[in-house]
Image: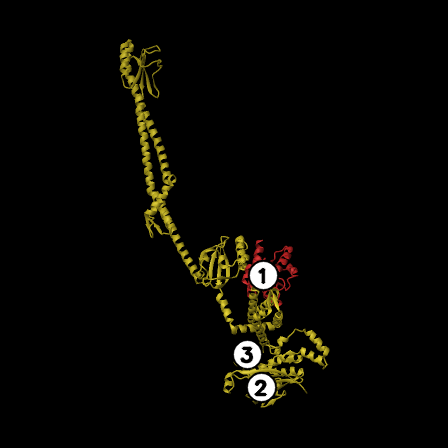
Amino acid sequence: MILSEVENPPGTKALASASRQNQALGLRSIGFKLAVAVFVMLGAASFVAGYQVSALALRHIIEGKEKAAVMVAEAASPALSAALDFGDGEAIAEQSRHILASRDVIGVAVWGASGNDPLLALRVRGWGRPQAESVHRTPATISVSRAVKSPSGKSLGFLKVEYSLAPEIAAFRMVQANIYVATFVLSVVLALLVIGLLRVTMLTPLFRLLAAMSSLGDGNTIVLADKRRDEIGRLARGFNLMSRAIEDRERSLAVARERTQQLLDHMQQAILVFDAQGHLLDLRSRVTESMFDPEALRGSVAEVLFPDETTIERELFDQWLNAVGIFQTARLAEVRDLAPTETQVRGRDGQERHLTLEFIPIVEAEALDRVMVLCTDVTEERRLQRSVEAKDVEHARQMQAMRALVAGGGQLLVEVLRRATQRLEQSRVDLLKDGMSRADVEQIFQRIHTVKGEARVFDQSELTRAAAGVEDTLSALYKNMQLEVLDAALVRDALEPGFREIETALSASQAMLVSASPIGPAVLDQITVRRQDLDALQAATSGRRDHIAAVAQRLASRPFGEALFNLSAAAGSWAEALHKRVTLDLQARDTLIPAELGRVLSGAITHLVRNAVAHGIELPRARLASGKAAVGVISVGAEVVSGGVRVVVKDDGQGASPVRLGRGTYSVEGPMFEPGFTQASQQQRKSGLAGHGMGLAAVRADVEGVGYRVHAINRPGLGFEVRIEPDTE
Amino acid sequence: MTSVPPTILVIDDSEAVLSRITDTLERAGFPVITSTQPVGTARHLVAASIVIIDFHMPGLDGVEVLTSLRAAADLLGRPVSFYLYTSDEDVARRARSLGFDGAIRNKGNLDALLLQVNSLARLLALKGMLR
C-alpha cells in the first residue's frame, strides 16, 4: 500500500510512532499471536507427519530384516539337515557358528528330532523347543524358527535364529531425531515466512493505516492509495471515504462557526454563554469584549452581570441559576420567564452601563447544555432620554405631568405643595428656639426629607434639589455636633438660604400648576364637592335672593376654563384640515359661569369657534394679501356683567359674507341664526366641517333656553364677533 | 409570569408618596396595601408577601418597625420578605445587616421601583418553585 499525503506528510515519523506503538503492544500484538499460532500449528503438524513417516520407515526396515532373517534361516536349514541326519555334532556346531557369524545374529539354537532342550545353543539360554515354524518379534529382536527337514521331507529338528534389531532401531532413532529437527526447523522457517508474509501484506499496511488515522486525528489530510482488490484495499477505500467525509464535515462546521461568529459580531448585543454552574464559556460576540472588563470575563457570569451582591437582581439571578440547574428541562418555560431582565454594570471605560438582559437556556439531548444571555446596552437610549429632558423639554414634560395630575383632580399636588409650605413653616418656627438639640435637628430633617420624597414622586425637580440641599446642610450640622445643643442662630443662618430656595421652588411649582390648569388659578382653591349635595343646596335656596342663595349659586358655578378644555387642540386640527392657520386666545379662565349657562356653554362655544375657523379665518395667502398676519386669531373670553356673564367669541377673519347679509350689525334675528342658513361651500360641507345649516340656530336655542341671548357683530373684512349675554328684557 | 402577583405592603410617612407608589404598582398588576403608621400594621401582614419600608420615618426608625413586624410575620407561619426603601446607596448595602432581606434602591424613581419589585416577584416565584 502506498501512502500518499496531500498535506503535512506524517511520513516516517508517524510510521515509526505507529510501529513503536505496535511494539509497545508486545505480547498482545497480532503479529506475535499469529507467530505463536503458526509456530504451534506448523510444529504440531510437522511433528505428527514426521512421526508417521518415521514409524512407517521403521516398519519397513523391520519387515525387511524379517525377510532377510527368514531367508538366512531357510538357507541354513539344508546345511543343517545333513548334519542333523548324520548326527554330526561338529558339523552342527560349525553351521551354527557360521550362522552366528552373520550380521546381527545374536543367538542360534538347534534341536534334534526330539527333546526339549536344544542340541546346541549359542549365546542363548532357556529356549524351549519350537513347536512349529514361526517368526517371533520383540521390540529388540526377531526370532525365526525353521524346521530342518531331510530331502525326503522327514523332520530332523528345528533351527532357531535370533536377530538383533538394535542397529535398525539405532538407525531409526537417528533418523527420527533428524526428522524432528527437520520438522522443527521447517516449522520455524515456515512460521517466519508466514509472519513475514503477513507483516508485509497485512501488518505493515495496517501500521500505515494507524499512522494515517493518527495523523488524521491531528488534523492533517491523508489519502491512501487503494489499488489492491483485497480486504486491505477495501479498508483503504473505506478510510479514504471516511477521511473525506470528516474533511467535509469539518469544513461545513468551520463555515457554520464562522457564520455564527459573524452573526454574533454584527449584533449590537453582547452575547455571553455560560454553563449550568455559571462559568463563562468561550463563545461570545465581539461587542462583549468592549462592553465588559476582560478580566471579569474569565470568572462567573454573576460577577460580570451583577457585580453588587447586595442587589435584588443578583439575588434573583443566583436563585434563577439554581432553579435552572435543578429543573433542567422539566419546567423550563416557567423558569425561563423568571430570569432577571435588567442590570447595571461598570464598563471598560469605567462608565455605568444600563443593560437589558434576555436569558435563553439551550437544551441538548433533553438536558440543559448551556445558557445564552443577550445583553443590550440601553445606556445611550436612557441617557438620550435624560438629555432630551433638558430644561425646555423637561419643562414641557412637567407641564404634561401637571396636566395629567390636574386632569385627575390636581388636588393631590395642591395638597403636597400646601403641606410642604406648612412643613417649612413649622421648621422655621422650631428654629426660633434658643438652642437646638439633636432631636430637634432630626425632626427638621425628617420634615425636609418628607418634602423631598413627595417632590420626587411628583417630578418636581427644582423642589427636590432645594430640599436635598437643606438635607445635606442638616446632615453636616448633625455630624459636627460636638455638644448636645446647638446655637439656634447658627442653625438658622445655615438653613435660611436653603429654606428660601425651597420657597422659590414651591412658588415655581405652583405657578406651573396654575398655568397647566385649564381653570387657571382656580385650581389652587379647588375642593371636591359632591353634585348631589350641591343640588340639594340649590333646591333649598331656590327662589331666595339672600346672601346664602348667592353663595349657593356661586358654589354651583363652574370656572369658564372648564368649558374651554381641549378647545385649543381641537381648533388646531380643524384649521389644519382646511389648510388654515389659527391660534386660540383663551382669556379669563377663572370667571365663574352660572350653573345653567355652564351646561350649554361648552357646546355653544365649540360651534362658534368651528364657524370662525370654517367661515371666518381666511387662507394664509388671502390674509397676507389683505395685509393681515398669516395666522388668524380667535379670542374667547368671559366677564361678569349685571345679571350674569358676557361670553365673547371674536375672530379677525373676513366676517360673514356681505353679499348675503349686507353690512353692519346683525342681531339675533339675522338670517344667519335661522335654521337652514349656511355659508358653507361644497368643499366645506364635504369635509364635514361646516354647517348643515343647524349650527348657529342650535346655539341660539340652547342659550335662549337658559335666559341668555346671542348677539352678532359683523365687520366685513375685519372679523366677526358673537356675544352671549344675559337676556335682560 | 403566570403565577399570582404578590401583595405588597408599603409603609411610608407620606400619603402622597404612597399614592403614587400604589398607582405605579397597581397598574403593573400588584395588589397594594399602604400604611403611614408603623404601629398597627401587623394586621396588614395577613395578605402581604412583600413589605417595603421607608428608612426615614419620623417617630420610629425603620429598623424598629422591622423587628415588630418580623415577630408578627413569624406567627403567621408564612414567608414574608422585608425590604428597605431608600435612595442612599450606603444604607442599601447595609440593609441585610440591619435585619432586612434586602433593599429597594433609588427611592423616588418610580421606574426603578417597578423594576425592582418585578425582580422581587420573580425571586419569590423561584423560591416557591424550589421549596
The residue tagged with tag 2: helix, strand or loop? strand
Q: Position of residue B81 (x, y in %)?
A: 59, 58
Look at the image and tell me whether residue A458 can be seen: no
Q: How many marks?
A: 3
Q: Earlier in the sequence, mark 3 or mark 2?
A: 3
CA distance separating discs 1 and 2: 64 Å
Which mark, by number, is residue A596?
none
Q: Which color was chain A given? A: yellow
CA distance separating discs 3 and 1: 49 Å
* Snapshot quadrant of residue A609: bottom right
Q: Specify few, some or many for label 2: CA neighbours under 10 Å numbering under 14, 14-19, or 20 or more.
A: many
Residue nearer the viewer, A378 or A56: A378
Q: Which color was chain B given? A: red
> What type is the residue that disc 1 sits on?
Leu
Which residue is denoted by mark 2 in the rendering? A720
Which residue is denoted by mark 1 in the rendering? B84
* Snapshot quadrant of residue A260: bottom left
> What type is the residue that disc 3 sits on?
Gly
| Chain ID at mark 1 | B
The residue tagged with tag 3: helix, strand or loop? helix
Question: Which numbered mark, 1 or 2, is in the foreground of this view?
Answer: 1
Residue A356, above or below A425: above
Which mark, by number, is residue A572?
3
Q: Position of residue B52 (x, y in %)?
A: 60, 61
| Chain ID at mark 2 | A
